[in-house]
Image: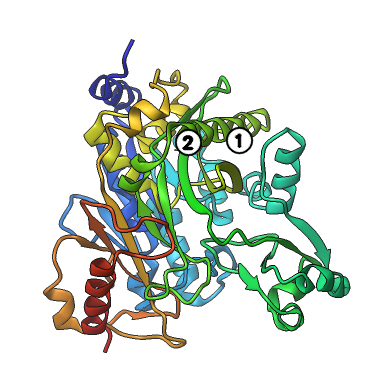
């Protein structure tokens, strides 16, 4: 039986029933696909509010602070400033009876919403301390490697034994270095000289050790979303080329800069099958650990071999566009399936990934960050002249922190052929747009 997108959407809407949907996320704009499955009544975010005139109560920390943070280094649970505490209280009092609370990533302070009101507030996320376990990359990597998965060959070095890396560097090969916790490429560095190990802050992290691995310079980066259901079933959604470390968009050597879904169609069936196989194995391992709901995975293809780079136990930057393409292609939607998993519905019967890739659109998204070492404000008049292809633009007078997102731009075509550089015409247009936006 083929998958019927409209029938599945109706099934999820019926299971949601009269309950309102409430989103708490790092970006407000990421909430919009939830509106396909019920009444999206409340959106709370740290950055990038929707702003549009939807019938939604919206509150964003960004609009209170008049500052957009770097989401890859900021954690709201550790922010004890007065205005942030007030924002948290607004969220706590705003989530009411007969609501389904959906978090982009579980946060500690959300526990005081759903534990005292379990009968009336439905929390469709993991307990934050349980979820945090899956963010410890060395533990995850070792467990997956022991399960037989092809994982990037990370090694772990104690801070006090950094000179052990000397032999590897002396062979003339660059290394990746990374702390045990990282997000969006923050904390990743490329080490080419021995001195870099002793000056890099990652190698003096609070965790007491760091990770190193060969730097696969010519590899192709991929990203994929998946979902795990109560019976342990795993479903995988549309894959994309990951945009990584693009110099005009970020200062981070391996910083996340967006996704290109169209270029995936150029890959051989063998590679797509390999991506699907490893993603399902990751999901099966998570299921055995009692994980539930949406997850993501970053992968590399090096000389025809698919490697797992890391898992993301949450929604991802790619999930919004993946959802939009799924709706157009009549494929499984990661947002809807996350709801379905917590509602106890059976996993949908999806075709093999290769068959679905051939029917998806060619859309891409590019994420531009503040590459200045200081906070910036944007040209108000330039903001007003931007097309609807731009999303997540800060409002007037909001300052953007270094490596804070300036915008997300959508394209109805591919923008890269390798994941590390943009096509010249795309790069040129983005540079021009950024120069008019930044004061």
State which quadrant residue 371 falls in.
bottom left
Count residues near mark 1 (Cα–Cα under 10 Å), then give few for <14, some for 14-19, many for 20+: many
- Direction from residue 364 to residue 293 in the image, left or right: right
- Direction from residue 161 to residue 11 in the image, left or right: left
Whether tag 1 and tag 2 are in contact, CB under 8 A, the answer is: yes
Viewer-proximal residue among 361 and 379: 361
Residue 365 lies, with reference to residue 188, above or below; the image says above
Residue 243 image position (x, y, % from top left): 42, 59
Asked which secondary structure carries label 2, the reply is strand
Q: Quadrant of the N terminus?
A: top left
Residue 416 image position (x, y, % from top left): 34, 58
Does residue 98 appear anywhere in the picture? no
Task: State the scheme by which the image is colored.
Answer: rainbow
Residue 102 image position (x, y, % from top left): 43, 43
Q: State the residue at coordinates (27%, 40%).
A: 325
- Direction from residue 438 to residue 351 in the image, left or right: right
User: How many marks do you count on the picture?
Assistant: 2
State which quadrant residue 143 falls in.
top right
Point out the tag, 1 or 2, that comes first from the N-terminus: 2
Does residue 387 appear anywhere in the picture? yes
Residue 399 image position (x, y, % from top left): 35, 82
Q: Using the image, tell me which numbered label, if any, was put on residue 226.
A: 2
Q: Quadrant of the C terminus?
A: bottom left
Q: Using the image, tell me which numbered label, if any, was put on residue 282.
A: 1
Residue at the limit of the structure toward the left, as seen here: 385
Residue 245 lies, with reference to residue 374, above or below; the image says above
Q: State the residue at coordinates (36%, 73%).
A: 64
Q: State the residue at coordinates (41%, 73%).
A: 404
Q: Using the image, tell me which numbered label, if any, was put on residue 259.
A: none
């Amino acid at each position: 039986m083929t998958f019927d997108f409209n029938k599945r959407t109706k099934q999820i809407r019926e299971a949601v029933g009269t309950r309102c949907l409430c989103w708490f996320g790092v970006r407000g704009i990421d909430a919009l696909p939830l509106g396909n499955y019920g009444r999206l009544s409340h959106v709370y975010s740290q950055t990038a509010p929707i702003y549009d005139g939807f019938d939604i109560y919206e509150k964003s920390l960004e609009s209170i602070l008049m500052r957009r943070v770097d989401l890859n280094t900021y954690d709201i649970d550790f922010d004890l400033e007065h205005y942030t505490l007030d924002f948290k209280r607004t969220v706590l009092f705003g989530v009411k009876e007969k609501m389904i609370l959906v978090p982009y990533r579980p946060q500690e302070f959300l526990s005081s919403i759903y534990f005292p009101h379990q009968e009336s507030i439905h929390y469709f996320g993991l307990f934050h301390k349980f979820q945090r376990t899956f963010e410890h990359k060395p533990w995850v990597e070792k467990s997956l490697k022991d399960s037989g998965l092809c994982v990037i060959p990370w090694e772990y070095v104690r801070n006090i034994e950094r000179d052990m890396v000397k032999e590897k560097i002396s062979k003339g090969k660059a290394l990746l270095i990374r702390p045990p916790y990282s997000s969006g490429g923050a904390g990743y560095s490329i080490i080419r000289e021995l001195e870099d190990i002793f000056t890099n802050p990652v190698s003096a992290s609070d965790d007491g050790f760091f990770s190193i691995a060969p730097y696969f310079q010519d590899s192709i980066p991929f990203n994929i979303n998946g979902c795990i259901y109560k019976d342990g079933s795993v479903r995988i959604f549309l894959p994309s080329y990951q945009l990584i470390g693009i110099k005009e968009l970020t200062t981070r050597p391996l910083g996340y800069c967006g996704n290109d879904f169209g270029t995936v169609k150029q890959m051989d069936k063998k590679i797509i099958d390999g991506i699907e196989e490893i993603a399902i194995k990751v999901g099966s391992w998570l299921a055995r650990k009692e994980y539930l709901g949406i997850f993501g995975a970053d992968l590399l293809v090096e000389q025809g071999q698919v490697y797992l780079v890391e898992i993301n136990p949450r929604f991802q930057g790619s999930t919004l566009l993946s959802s939009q393409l799924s709706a157009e292609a009549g494929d499984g939607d990661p947002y809807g399936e996350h709801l379905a998993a917590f509602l106890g519905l059976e996993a949908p019967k999806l075709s093999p990934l290769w068959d679905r890739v051939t029917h998806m659109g060619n859309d891409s998204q590019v994420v531009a960050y503040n590459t200045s070492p200081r906070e910036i404000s944007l040209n108000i008049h330039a903001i007003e002249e931007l097309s609807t292809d731009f999303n997540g633009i800060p409002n007037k007078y909001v300052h953007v922190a270094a490596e804070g997102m300036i915008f997300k731009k959508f394209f109805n075509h591919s923008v890269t052929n390798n994941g590390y550089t943009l096509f010249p015409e795309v790069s040129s247009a983005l540079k021009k747009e950024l120069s008019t936006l930044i004061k």
